[in-house]
Amino acid sequence: MAKAKVSGPARAVPANTADYIKAVATELFFKNGFKATTTRNITEACGFTPGALYNHFSSKDKLLFEIIKDTHQVVEEKIYLALGQPARNQSDRLKNLIREFVVFHSTNRQSALVANQEYHFLSGEEKEHVRQLRRRVRAVFEDILRAGAAVGEFDLPKTSGEPAGHLLAMAMIDMVVRVSEWFNDDGAMTPEQLADVYAEFAARMAHSGAAIVPIRPDAT
């Protein structure tokens, strides 16, 4: 398959040149992949001289790291937003979280897909830093699932080895992040409609017929 080519500045250069480079690089990494994209590809797409990237980023790897770190920062903001929304029980909290994730991954497809697929090309401390960010996200899902299971609201299967809450959290996150791979703005559903459907999927994955248990005011 021929790789997509981006040439010339596709947008006006903002005052923050580093942010402009990250935006252009994100588009190229999304279309062609990190490995297939050269620094020259990036600077040409920006309309810069070949060495201009190094005035802002020490390497292409550092540029990828900054893109991923920025994306995770937005994801964590979405988590705080979801957890701050009204919720009668753990099911509502889970649905709120899923909705925010789905809307983000369907409206920010390029940065989301780059963050989720290309981070494997990082190494050393930067790769470990991203892994820690990913673990923090997963921990939020696990906390909700454990809290629901503890009061009988969620019915998690008995497992040997990995805890069920850990496995289910990974399954839910994987289900949601893959929205960035296929969502189409011209499709039959809006991001919000898709988010409602996925929220229901997630709740049913956790419930398995368990009763809904209201959250006590002192437990939020």
Image (spheres, helix red, strand yellow):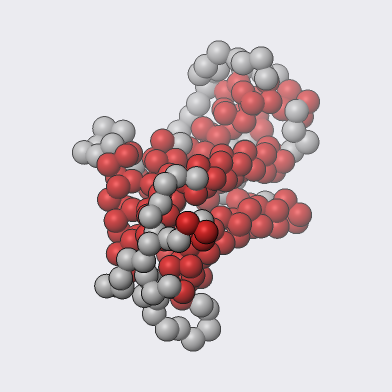
Q: Quadrant of the N terminus?
A: top left
Where's residue 43, x and y in %? 64, 25
Q: Residue at x 39, y 74 (%)?
A: 152
Compared to residue 194, the image places residue 127 above or below, namely: below
Compared to residue 58, the image places residue 141 above or below, namely: below
Q: Residue at x 41, y 35 (%)?
A: 107
Q: Residue furthest bottom?
A: 160
Q: Residue at x 29, y 56 (%)?
A: 200
Instruction: Out of 167 and 109, give the one closest to the viewer.
Output: 167
Where's residue 193, x and y in %? 27, 42
214 relative position to 197: left or right: right
140 relative position to 210: left or right: right
Camera sees residue 205: no
Residue 105 image-quadrant placement: top left
Camera sees residue 179: yes
4 relative position to 74: left or right: left
Where's residue 60, x and y in %? 69, 39
Q: Residue furthest left?
A: 188
Instruction: Out of 103 and 50, give the one closest to the viewer.
Output: 103
Number of on-image labels: 0
Instruction: Out of 129 and 206, give the one closest to the viewer.
Output: 206
Instruction: Out of 125 and 72, give the one closest to the viewer.
Output: 72
Where's residue 99, x and y in %? 38, 47
Q: Residue at x 32, y 39 (%)?
A: 192
58 relative position to 30: left or right: right
